[in-house]
């Protein structure tokens, strides 16, 4: 299986285990979309760039405040929450969950997926 | 040497910091420019580049540095270069009082991208700008005059520099500040910094 196929398998698995997710995307840490599954027709290239920007800033904030290396960062709106997980040095996994979703469960699954993504990249 | 600017200590007193933005294509020297000028530790967001851009790292969010020039605190924001980060150009340019558009003088194939970036920004905010032609220390670079012609700008609005050298970068900054009207190059400033008196590559061409 190619790298990309393996990545698609990982995000499809994540979406299957948490059906309420509105989307998941894997991007390189410099903002290129690698594998994506977005339900609402968002532009994956744009989402990938924004995920890399948010994670990049998060990393600097985390370092500056002596929080260690960044594992995840999030953006919450009234309708949905976006979680961005570092996937090693090279990638980022972003997921979109509706407001009120079970975050504990999401974190558990998505952190595993991020680990898998890191090892694939 | 200028005293380090402490925004907390100077809150509400003294001159307000001037927000300047550095934009331009990938590899133009935006991060180098901010790093060569900042007197405080630069907040950088360079990540491993996956595309072949002729270097290992690329900026994904911003560069942030500060300096004080003749008592005027300056906040410098460097932008990412790729189109996919154009939302950051908008975010970072909000409230900017001046813009430095950098282009690599040895990469004329990227001038059109530089022009698109300039149009993107100036169509959204009206901000005084200068064009800086970097890599003047390398052979076969376009002169500032040629680049001015390319952009259809007065030659006074285009300068040559080596973005990795602070003495060179500071002249570019002063040029922008003069355009913005926020700064007059004072005698004391020139003579107080011996480095500035030394002729730099690129400046002889003006
Ligand atoms: N010789 C020389 N090298 C330069 C000059 N300006 C930048 N460089 C080099 O060019 C490379 C790219 O510079 P950066 O400052 O990372 O470019 P950037 O515009 O921030 O690029 P992105 O963040 O990827 O958009 C670095 O290796 C710098 O050392 C210059 O004026 N002269
Ligand atoms: Mg940069």
Image: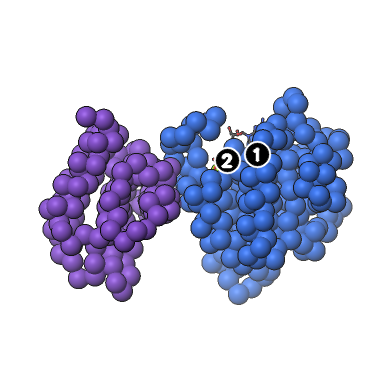
Chain colours: A purple, B blue
In the picture provided, is B120 more to the left or to the right than A101? right
Residue lying at the far top of the rendered structure: B139
The image shows residue A116 at horizontal and vertical percentages of 20, 39
Q: Which mark is residue A90?
A: none
Residue B73 visible, this orientation: no
Categorize mark 2 by other alpha carbons within 10 Å: few (<14), some (14-19), many (20+).
many
Q: Is residue B195 left or right of residue A119?
A: right
Label 2: chain?
B
Tell which quarter ligand 1 is in.
Answer: top right
Quarter the C terminus of chain B occupies: top right
Q: Ligand 1: does it lie within 8 Å of the C-beta at label 2?
A: yes
Q: Where does label 1 land, which residue?
A: B110
Secondary structure, mark 1, is helix
Q: Chain of mark 1?
A: B
Q: Is residue B121 above or below residue B205?
A: below
Q: Nearer the viewer, residue B85 or B73?
A: B85
């Amino acid at each position: 299986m190619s790298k990309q196929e393996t990545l698609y398998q990982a995000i499809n698995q994540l979406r299957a285990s948490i059906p309420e997710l509105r989307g998941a995307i894997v991007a390189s840490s410099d903002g290129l979309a690698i594998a994506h599954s977005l339900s609402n027709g968002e532009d994956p290239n744009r989402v990938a760039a924004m995920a890399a920007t948010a994670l990049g800033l998060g990393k600097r904030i985390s370092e500056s405040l002596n929080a260690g290396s960044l594992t995840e960062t999030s953006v919450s709106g009234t309708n949905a929450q976006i979680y961005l997980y570092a996937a090693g040095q090279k990638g980022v996994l972003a997921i979109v969950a509706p407001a009120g979703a079970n975050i504990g469960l999401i974190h558990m699954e998505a952190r595993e997926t991020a680990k898998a993504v890191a090892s694939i990249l | 040497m200028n005293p380090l600017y402490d925004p907390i200590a100077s809150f509400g007193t003294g001159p307000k910091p001037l927000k300047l933005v550095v934009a331009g294509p990938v590899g133009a020297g935006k991060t180098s420019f901010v790093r060569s000028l900042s007197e405080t530790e630069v907040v950088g967001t360079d990540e491993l580049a996956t595309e072949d851009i002729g270097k290992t790292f690329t900026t994904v969010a911003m560069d942030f540095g500060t300096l004080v020039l003749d008592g005027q605190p300056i906040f410098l924001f460097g932008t990412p270069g790729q189109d996919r980060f154009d939302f950051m150009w908008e975010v970072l340019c909000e409230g900017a009082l001046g813009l430095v558009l950098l282009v690599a003088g040895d990469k004329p194939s990227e001038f059109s991208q530089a022009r698109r970036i300039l149009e993107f920004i100036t169509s959204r905010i009206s901000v005084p700008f200068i064009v800086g032609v970097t890599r003047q220390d390398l052979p076969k670079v376009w002169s500032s005059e040629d680049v001015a012609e390319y952009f259809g700008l007065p030659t006074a609005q285009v300068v040559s520099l080596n973005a990795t050298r602070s003495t060179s970068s500071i002249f570019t900054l002063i040029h922008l500040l003069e355009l913005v009207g926020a700064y007059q190059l004072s005698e004391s400033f020139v003579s107080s910094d011996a480095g500035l008196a030394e002729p730099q590559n690129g400046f002889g061409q003006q």
